[in-house]
Image (tube, helix red, strand yellow):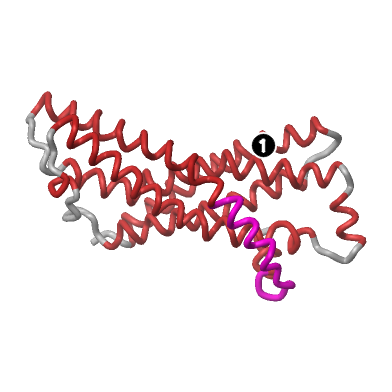
Amino acid sequence: MLRQTIYFIFVGRRQTGQILEQLFAIGNRSVLFVTVTLGFLGLISIFQVAIQIQKVLPDYSMVGAAFLTVMIREFGPTITGLMVATRTGSAIAAEIGSMVVTEQIDALRMSNADPINYLVVPRFIACGMMLVVLSVFAVLVATATGMIMGRQGFGIPYNTFLNLSLVKWQDVVIGIMKSAAYGFAIPLIAAQAGLSAKGGSEGVGWATTRSVVNCSFAVIVLDFFISGFGYVVLSP
């Protein structure tokens, strides 16, 4: 499916309208979900770390620097990827699975419209683009809530929290690589689960479940390998 998707990206018919629809469905409709999740993650992370530091040595000068590094490189893209995997992956699998069991996929093939080009390519392009954007937005949200928790709970000044001394260009590159990899993997796995649906509504339900599980597992596996690549190849 990956090979066919890449092929149709370059030689298939352009479907700008569907890509725009998927950009809105995947990106705009995930903003609230990502905002709430990453906002609370920023609050919880700073609270837990500051409490532990308070027990040992109450020096909060590097809390923000360490938080930003981890958020940009790890938590921002990965948590966002898991959120999109549950929300968007399940939607893609359910939609395509419903089309399979109602024989709409067969109707597409009879109309000489390839399902990969018509259904998968727009979602592949849109999800790859929007997950990068959502990850950047998620880092900003978590940073804002983390700053509020640090200032109100532990008296950390905002300018002290916004310390970018530990953030390297490698961290930004790895974060973007992870976001893009998750964005390209999720629609492929979800579409594969939907296209393999059999039977009626029960088959669509199993396809949706399989999509969420496989997409979430793919995010974790990709996180492991890209992190390892970053530390081995891109380490300063």
Quadrant of res 21: bottom right
Q: Which residue is mark 1?
A: 210
Outermost top residue:
55
**Is 199 situated left or right of 87 in this image?**
right
**Is 148 situated left or right of 220 in this image?**
left
Q: Where does the image place residue 205, in percent across and percent down from the top left?
A: 74, 32
In magenta segment, residue 200: no
**Quadrant placement of the N terminus:** bottom right
Vertical arrangement, residue 178 with respect to residue 43, above or below: below
Q: Where does the image place residue 207, in percent across and percent down from the top left?
A: 72, 38
Outermost bottom residue:
11
**Is 193 situated left or right of 100 in this image?**
left
Q: Where does the image place residue 30, in percent across and percent down from the top left?
A: 53, 45
Q: Residue at x 36, y 61 (%)?
A: 173
Vertical arrangement, residue 94 with respect to residue 107, above or below: above
Magenta segment:
9-27
Q: Residue at x 77, y 43 (%)?
A: 97
Looking at the picture, which amino acid does disc 1 mark?
A: Arg
Q: Residue at x 87, y 60 (%)?
A: 109
Outermost right residue:
110
